[in-house]
Amino acid sequence: MKGPTTVINYLIALVLILSLNFILPRLMPGDPLQAIYGDEAIIAMTPELKAELVARFALDQSTGRQFWAYISSLLRGDLGYSYFYNAPVLAVIFGSLPWTVLLVGLAIIISTLIGVVLGIESGYRRGRPLDRALLGVLMFASGFPDFFAGILLLLFFGVVLGLAPLAGATTPYAGCGGLTFLTDLFKHLALPLTSLAMVRIASPFLLTRNAMVISLGEPFILTARAKGCPDKVIRYRHAGKNSLLPVVTATGMQLPHMVSGALFIEIVFSYPGMGSLLYNALLTRDYPLLQGILLVLTITVLSVNLLVDIVYTRLDPRIAYAY
């Protein structure tokens, strides 16, 4: 019963978000078209374009028909038109979304893997010098905001040492391909990825360490020791595997914070992802693009959280019985 209930809960959340995205511009004072597109765009519009937009959004009809027109447009992939980029909103977003997915995806994978491995080693050596050193270093690193860590890395490795590019995702007009392109890509990605992942290693580390400490006192660990299992097998196959469940949950909960952190990181490094796109949309008051970006990010976060919930019950079927 857990699976269908979870999907229904997320569908309800999605409907509420879509309704809020629809209602807010219409609750603002003045013309709804003015709330959607802004004063500057309305002034620059011709009467013919205004009439076309009124017909597209069904603004001259009842609220129910407006909502149906809004949902129908979303189902067709029509999120509106960006008057700054002079292109459909969905096309503009898809031009930047892969860069953010690459950055956030690699940051989650790297921070989780490093945090889990260090948490297993630290929990297995609880109270020893390595455990205390890891706790101190990671807690200190997690205290930095990700954008501040990015600024420090940019100044030191980019400006002072000149080892990394200062902006962008690739070298403009380089015309390279294959391995050369990948090398250039990861050279630009190194600093934003490091700054985003570095401050988030502490969360999976602490969860894994605490779960390891609890697991090492369980009877099945004593049984494994009595059977003569090597320390590495006990550490990773028995205690370590049993410590992964809270990390899965933390990964899903970490995604919204990772996405918001990536938005600031992209602005610091002029990385051509959703953060830079959102910043430009704010500067130019491109309201349709702003709405489209926030809607796409919200749906992405909801989808990943749903996936994490499903994976969690697959890892431990006993979780389903709690519902």
Image (spheres, rainbow, N blue to C red):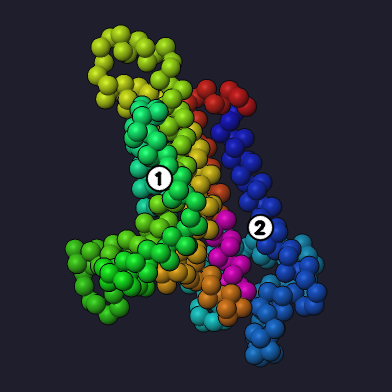
Check the picture and name the quadrant holding the C terminus. Answer: top right
The residue at which mark 1 appears reads as: 137
Residue shown at 39%/27% (left/top)?
A: 126
x, y percentage for residue 145?
A: 50, 57
Q: Is residue 80 left or right of residue 310?
A: right
Amino acid at dot 2: Leu
The one of 92 and 248 positioned closer to us in this rendering: 248
x, y percentage for residue 12?
A: 66, 46
Magenta region: which residues? 286-298
* Picture mark count: 2
The residue at which mark 2 appears reads as: 18
- Taking the image as drawn, is residue 120 in sight? no
Residue 117 sits in which quadrant? top left
Q: Assess whether residue 114 is covered by the magenta stretch.
A: no
Amino acid at dot 1: Val
x, y percentage for residue 54?
A: 71, 78
Helix, strand or loop at label 2? It is helix
Q: Is residue 155 left or right of residue 214?
A: left
Residue shown at 73%/65% (left/top)?
A: 24
Check the picture and name the quadrant holding the N terminus. Answer: top right
Residue 80 sits in which quadrant? bottom right
- Residue 153 versus residue 215 in the image, above or below: below
The one of 192 and 317 positioned closer to us in this rendering: 192
